């Protein structure tokens, strides 16, 4: 009689492959303390652990804090967490996330964010918070991201404030994609893209309300030759200024424009002829 195959008969390599698809909470609940073999496999530092701590209650948090993270916190590669209940602040007192490559942070404080950046070398960063709005703090944050996080490939920010960009000492940036879900002036947008030579995609919100007459983009006429796709939400920007912005990204092939304009919509049709793909969803404000 042929012997039935059991889950325990699977090879270590196949089990590790399965574990990569599971969140660490489910992994520990299902397999931890079944036997010594599973315990060793679960704690293997070569696992690509992922922890989703976005919508967890106090009991789940204690399970992470007291059992999961002390064993494998240093090996977690993907982390999603909200600091609304100060969970991240509590964890950082005793846990090192030094092998993180991707993190999604909600309601995070500046001190916790800087602590994460100091101990990890990220490839992807998502931030959604209302706690970082001071211009000096924002400059410090972006300076660290652009100057020290050399492996970053993608950034997505929703900071609920106006963004300002300075000249950074960027030796080598691997950034390919940026999503800025907060307003910036067209001059700051130009300053940013002109310093990121490998950027391929950018999505941003340009609002030139109260933009200074003396533009700080005057020293950034080199533009960006690498961007291929651009998505802009625009407000309070005149047509000539919009054309000026696009002159810095002359190799763009795909464009998406949203927002509100107060110039003739026919001018947008002229701009459309320049690009391979052009999608437009603009509200025309009549003066």
Image (cartoon, rainbow, N blue to C red):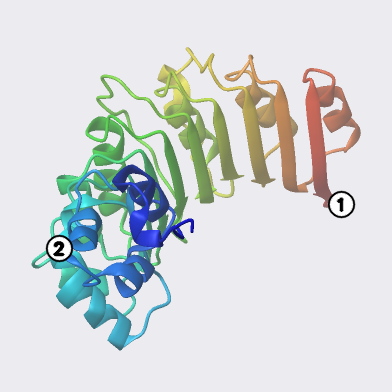
Q: Position of residue 61 (x, y in %)?
A: 27, 79
- Comparing 83 with 109, the one in front is 83
Residue lying at the far right in this picture: please name it: 266
Residue at 86 percent across and 23 percent down: it is: 270
Q: Position of residue 243 (x, y in %)?
A: 69, 25
Q: Is residue 33 visible?
A: yes
Q: Residues within 10 Å of mark 1 (few under 14, many from 20)?
A: few
Q: Is residue 207 visible?
A: no
Residue 283 to residue 51: above or below: above
Residue lying at the far front in this picture: please name it: 1
Residue 267 to residue 178: above or below: above
Residue at 81 percent across and 40 percent down: it is: 280
Residue 262 to residue 115: above or below: above
Q: CA distance from mark 2 to mark 1?
A: 62 Å
- Comparing 79 with 210, the one in front is 79
Q: Position of residue 139 (x, y in %)?
A: 29, 44
- Comparing 199 with 4, the one in front is 4
Say left or right for 171 vs 231: left
Q: Which residue is mark 2?
A: 71
Residue lying at the far left in this picture: please name it: 94
Q: Which residue is mark 1?
A: 286
- Using the rendered view, name the quadrant where residue 228 is placed: top right
Say left or right for 255 vs 216: right
């Amino acid at each position: 009689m042929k012997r039935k195959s059991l889950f325990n008969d699977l090879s270590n390599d196949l089990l590790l492959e399965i574990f990569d698809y599971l969140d660490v909470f489910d992994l520990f609940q299902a397999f931890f303390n079944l036997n010594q073999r599973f315990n060793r496999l679960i704690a293997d530092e070569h696992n690509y652990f992922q922890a989703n701590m976005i919508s967890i209650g106090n009991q789940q948090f204690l399970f992470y804090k007291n059992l999961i993270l002390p064993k494998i916190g240093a090996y977690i590669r993907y982390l999603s967490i909200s600091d609304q209940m100060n969970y991240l602040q509590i964890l950082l007192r005793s846990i090192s996330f030094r092998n993180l490559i991707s993190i999604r942070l909600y309601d995070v404080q500046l001190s916790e964010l800087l602590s994460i950046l100091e101990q990890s070398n990220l490839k992807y960063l998502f931030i959604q918070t209302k706690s970082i709005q001071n211009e000096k703090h924002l400059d410090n944050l972006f300076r660290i991201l652009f100057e020290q996080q050399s492996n970053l490939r993608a950034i997505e920010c929703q900071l609920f404030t106006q963004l300002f960009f300075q000249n950074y000492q960027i030796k080598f940036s691997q950034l390919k994609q940026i999503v800025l879900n907060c307003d910036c002036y067209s001059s700051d947008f130009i300053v940013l893209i002109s310093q990121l030579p490998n950027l391929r995609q950018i999505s941003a919100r340009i609002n030139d309300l109260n933009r200074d007459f003396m533009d700080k983009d005057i020293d950034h006429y080199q533009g960006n030759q690498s961007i291929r796709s651009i998505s802009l939400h625009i407000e309070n920007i005149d047509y000539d200024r919009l054309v000026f912005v696009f002159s810095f990204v002359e190799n763009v092939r795909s464009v998406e424009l949203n927002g509100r304009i107060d110039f003739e919509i026919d001018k947008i049709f002229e701009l459309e002829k320049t690009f391979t793909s052009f999608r437009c969803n603009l509200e025309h404000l009549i003066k």
